[in-house]
Image (tube, rainbow, N blue to C red):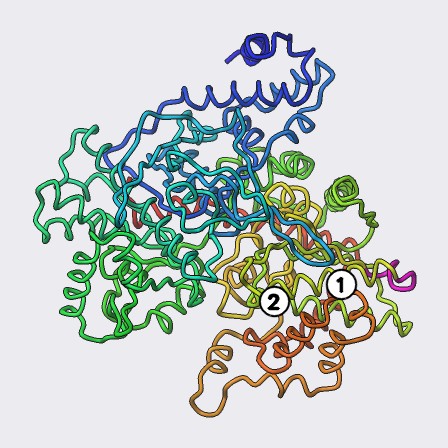
Amino acid sequence: MDLKERLEQTTRERFGLAPDRCDDRQLYEALLIVTRRAAEERPAPAGERKLYYFSAEFLMGKLLDNNLLALGLRDQAQELLASWGRDLNAVEEQEPEPSLGNGGLGRLAACFLDSIAALGLPGDGVGLCYHYGLFRQKFVDNRQAEFPDPWIGEESWLIPTETVFPVSCGGFDLKAKLWDVAIPGAHSGVANRLHLFDVEEPAPPPEQGIVFDKTDIVHHLTSFLYPDDGDEAGRLLRVYQQYFMVSAGAQLILQELKERGYSPAELADHTVIQINDTHPSMVIPELIRLLTAQGLTMDEAIEQVSRTCAYTNHTILAEALEKWPMAFIEKVAPQLVPIIRELDRRAREVCPDPALAILDEKGLVHMAHMDIHYGFSVNGVAALHTEILKKSELKGFYGLYPDRFNNKTNGVTLRRWLEACNPALTRLIDECIGGGWRQDPGRLVGLMDFMDNDRVLSHLLTVKQSARERFCRTLREAQGIELDPNSIFDVQIKRLHEYKRQQMNALYVIQKYLEIREGRLPEHSVTVLFGAKAAPAYVMARHIIHLILCLQRLIENDPVVRPWLRVVMLENYNVTWAEQLIPAADISEQISLASKEASGTGNMKLMANGAVTLGTLDGANVEIAELVGPGNIYTFGAHSDRVLRLYDDRGGARYRSLDYYHTPRVERLVDFLLSPELLELGDARALAELWRDMKGKDWFMALLDVEEYISVKDLAVRQYGDRKSWARKMLVNIAKSGYFSSDRTIRQYNQDIWHL
């Protein structure tokens, strides 16, 4: 492909200008158009079976750089723009980030689509075309404020199609309009699609914050990801979203099945559906309904769907194992009610245990139970997580269907999370072991041969220093905050949730603040960086953000503490921020309560970029620890078996936060929330509510682990001073990160589940 010729043609047609006369915005639009067309022109992968990956989220991040890389055009684009005196990075900054996801679930789905295409497998994503995302986060008076996050302009990655499907809801009909995003595969020469469904007449953004009429389903169904479910209207809207997605997606599957020359009775032989968490679970009864409408008996339809659908469980948290009132489904999709009741009746015949029923005595439909009874595969996403599913959370189902359970440890695409976001480190790796790791990430282990190579270790430290300096420049431009690039960058970037325990990290900050005020200085300055959004209705998570922002302000104004300790919360943390911060990170905070984090993927991205993990033995941290060895990770905290016992009322072992609060060190840290210094900066009611919760409830046991956490983090800070030893830790982590490539994960999905 002659990129120069296509760009010149596009800029003249669109702007009446030669490319070297265009500004960065015009060059971005021209590159988008050319790259989008190049991806569209690629053929779809061939195969007798096709995958449909259903997910409520696809956190794609900016796509220009990623797609140029996948199409083999990135170097050409850089050289071409440089010849016109322009910088590709500056052009890429013009791109808005697609607001199609929020956290690890959506970013994993994006990595999986990338790997499916790179491996040349026939597999498309299915989701919704949200217009305003979760929200755009701003900090006002040390609090989170939410605003719409629009991203669809005159030119975007969305490809219009002529496809429209009717979706019948209780009392009214909707039309699901299909938009596609092309997903080109690196090195494969093919491209898959992300199918996104939208309503016919989407509403404009709300005039005030993210408040909108949640009863206006026709116009607002695709406005926001995860609309506030603090009231019945919000919960109903979520059910409407889920049904709209699966009904349109199921119709698309059957249409494409027919176009491929197969009958509805051959669905399971030529199609596989991966249900990513429970949001798309209604695809099961909806497909059964559509198949019976096409002439299959109920028995035949259930048999086909049960051989077609596979379920990925991403968490044991009750809030994510969705249970919707049957009354909601009667209102949203009454046509599914008799099918769900029939599925429940049949499941009870297989196992009369009411704990495994689809419909419980309260009239709640357990989506995960439906997925397990009427799917052929159930997988967890890390070794520990899968064992907890089998032995605890889904023990009854494992006893009933042991052959369906399997583990697929998550992975991330190193094309974006190493090659694209950290070119300096990529060049060093290439110098050491060549470029074959791009196709076979397992080859990164060859870096272990350089453990005693002083030149490589020194270069590795230089790469990290440059990344910190680059991040400091970005932060200064974005938030006006000046940081010391020679400080240790201690990074916790993930959704704000009590189980991820950002509040425990805040207690560490308080401990260091008090020590420095008392004249006990650390061995090295530390910058604690947070990136997180709190769900609007999650009050305690919002309080934790408020605490962090108050601590940030407190330290910023303290000339004694400021040279030794800084706290920064990134505003509107997203993929773009992650691409800047992850290469700069020194310590990777993975401090969830053991048993609660299914896997994590930020831990993998940070590891691949040379950050050293500080974490509990939770999720994929367990596998990271096994790979890198005890000298190259910092672990602490109660193990998962103990945590599960502490949640159990039997034997009087239940966790009581007061038992841990009433120790001199912990009490001092928690009580600092009500100190005059913080109350002067913060909201007394919010800080008091957080104080009472940590002291009297602490459901995710931050006080259980906080003292050991502080001690182990102090050890990491001390050992950071031995630069050569720390560089070795970095090298080991990079070398062993190849296992966590999403290419490996997808190969395992295909080998064990999909058989594409």
Residue at figure coordinates x 21%, y 37% from the top left: 254
Indicate whether residue 229 is drawn in magenta.
no
Indicate whether residue 562 is drawn in magenta.
yes
Q: CA distance from mark 2 to mark 1?
A: 17 Å
In the picture, measured across the screen, residue 631 lies left or right of residue 391, that is right
Note whether 363 is above or below 243 in the view shown: below
Quadrant into which the C terminus falls: top left
Tell me residue 244's x, y (percent).
Answer: 33, 45
What residue sits right under mark 2 in the picture? 501
Tell me residue 1's x, y (percent).
Answer: 50, 13
Three-letter code for the amino acid on which mark 2 is drawn: Arg
Three-letter code for the amino acid on which mark 1 is drawn: Cys
Task: Classify mark 2: residues with Cα within 10 Å, few (<14), some (14-19) or many (20+).
Answer: many
In the picture, measured across the screen, residue 686 lies left or right of residue 158, that is right
Going from N to C along the chain, the mark reached first, 2 or 1, is 2
Residue segment shown in magenta: 558-565
In the image, 653 versus 680, the foreground residue is 680
- When asked about the image quadrant of residue 76, the answer is top right
Residue at figure coordinates x 14%, y 64% from the top left: 346
In the image, 466 versus 319, the foreground residue is 319
Note whether 740 is above or below 557 in the view shown: above
Tell me residue 622's x, y (percent).
Answer: 52, 64
Q: Nearer the viewer, mark 2 or mark 1?
A: 1
Task: Classify mark 1: residues with Cα within 10 Å, few (<14), some (14-19) or many (20+).
Answer: many
Instruction: Please identify the dominant SS of the magenta region.
Output: loop
Residue at figure coordinates x 72%, y 42% from the top left: 456
What residue sits right under mark 1 in the picture? 550
